[in-house]
Amino acid sequence: MSRILNKKSEVQQISIDSEDESRRIDNFLMSRFKGLPRTRIYQMLRRGEVRVNKGRKKPGYRLQSGDVLRIPPISLETEKAPATPPRYLIDMLDSAVLFEDDKLIVVNKPSGIVVHSGVAVLMG
């Protein structure tokens, strides 16, 4: 397995060994940073943030034994809590409940409020 040469100030330098030889650099980075979106990996390659032997490489570059990769500090986002609707929307929906018991709820739904799960957007 490729080994980290140093981790000075979060910048990683990874030496490629025979196990990772001939892998595409984009696939290598995707397997190394599983939580990182593909778009971010390709963005780092396009901008030259990831260097191979101090030079830029395209995503299709095949790694060679002895290559040294310089990888910038990468922050993996943790799972975000589900978004809560704004207070005014909660108040509006609470006031729209006409009847409620253990088995039934009757709501005077304002127009523009989505009833299907997925997109929760106030129209208009």
Image (spheres, rainbow, N blue to C red):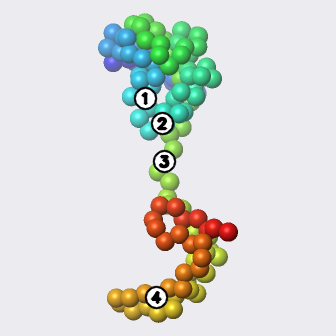
- Whether label 2 touches label 1, CB < 8 Å: yes
* Residue at 64% over, 76% down: 88
Determine whether, in the image, residue 16 is placed left or right of residue 74: left
Quadrant the C terminus occupies: bottom right
Secondary structure type for disc 1: helix
- Residue type (three-letter) at the residue carrying disc 2: Leu
- Residue type (three-letter) at the residue carrying disc 1: Met
Report which residue position mark 2 lands on: 36
Report which residue position mark 4 lands on: 106
Comparing 56 with 68, the one in front is 56
> Does residue 99 sit above or below 60 in this rendering?
below
Residue 84 visible (yes or no): no
Q: Earlier in the sequence, mark 2 or mark 3?
A: 2
Residue 26, position in %: x, y?
Answer: 46, 23
Q: Residues within 10 Å of mark 3 (few under 14, many from 20)?
A: few
Q: Earlier in the sequence, mark 4 or mark 3?
A: 3
Q: Earlier in the sequence, mark 1 or mark 4?
A: 1
Q: Residues within 10 Å of mark 2 (few under 14, many from 20)?
A: some
**Between tags 4 and 2, which lies in front?**
4
- Residue type (three-letter) at the residue carrying disc 4: Val
> Quarter-wise, where is residue 108 in the image?
bottom right
Report which residue position mark 3 lands on: 78
Report which residue position mark 1 lands on: 30
Q: Earlier in the sequence, mark 1 or mark 3?
A: 1
Q: Residues within 10 Å of mark 1 (few under 14, many from 20)?
A: some
* Residue at 41% over, 7% down: 64
